[in-house]
Amino acid sequence: MMVLDKLDELIMKNTVVIGVTGMPGAGKATVIEIAQKMDYGVVIMGDEVREETQCQGLEQTPANVGRIMLKMRQEGGPASIAKRCIPKIEKMKNIVIIIDGIRSIYEADEFKKHFRNFKLLAIHSSPGTRFKRLFKRRRSDDPAGWETFLERDWRELRVGIGSAIASADMMIVNEGRKATLKAEVKKTLENVIEDAESRSSSKG
């Protein structure tokens, strides 16, 4: 049992953890799509909020999900959702893990405390571009109109996502074709992993 524990600890020390931040509709889902194709582990922070919304017997509308998101952070602290994700990440055996949906520097700092090979990637798109994508996507918690879209943006900014984006280690601007974003994401992820491997081997 002790050997297995030490092996798990060694795996986690060398695991590359990449957090993804960005406003709704910026293109974070494409990062997850690429990560899954590359056989990386994926943890989606928004799933914690959607699960909590469901547990409370509420329909997963933008207003309900947003209200639960704020409530969870108000009651448990600004890094509460990140803390809920950490045990799930620690159980994963992937050498690369992507965390989707970081919304504040508090969450990024929480992950940095637990994972030494942590980097934050921001995906950025203009409001007009993001609204078109969300309107086309039509997930249950996506806004149905411009006013709802702006309300959701404001809610995200209140949580602190602007600071997370501004403090990101890397940023990809996504205003073009999806194929272009996919190529940029793949290259960025590969660069982060190569850099982590290089630093690890230099330490012996």
Image (cartoon, rainbow, N blue to C red):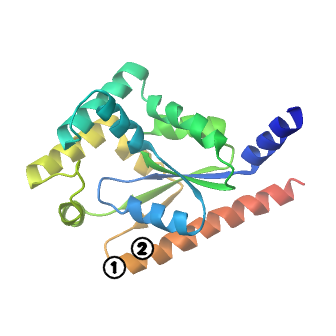
Q: Is residue 40 visible?
A: yes
The one of 97 and 175 positioned closer to us in this rendering: 97
Q: Amino acid at mark 2?
A: Leu
Q: Are marks 1 and 2 in contact (CB under 8 Å)?
A: yes
Q: Residue at x 71, y 58 (%)?
A: 196
Q: Is residue 160 above or below residue 186?
A: above
- Taking 13 as reference, is 192 left or right? left
- Taking 137 as reference, is 31 left or right? right
The one of 1 and 183 positioned closer to us in this rendering: 1
Secondary structure of the residue carrying tag 1 is loop
Q: Is residue 24 above or below residue 133?
A: above
Q: Residue at x 33, y 79 (%)?
A: 177
Q: Position of residue 76 (x, y in %)?
A: 42, 22
Mark 2 lies on residue = 181
- Disc 1 versus disc 2: distance between alpha carbons? 7 Å
Q: Is residue 103 visible?
A: no
Q: Position of residue 111 (x, y in %)?
A: 57, 39
The answer to which quarter of the image holds residue 159 is top left
Mark 1 lies on residue = 177
Query: Quick one: quadrant of the C terminus?
Result: bottom right
Q: Residue at x 33, y 39 (%)?
A: 50
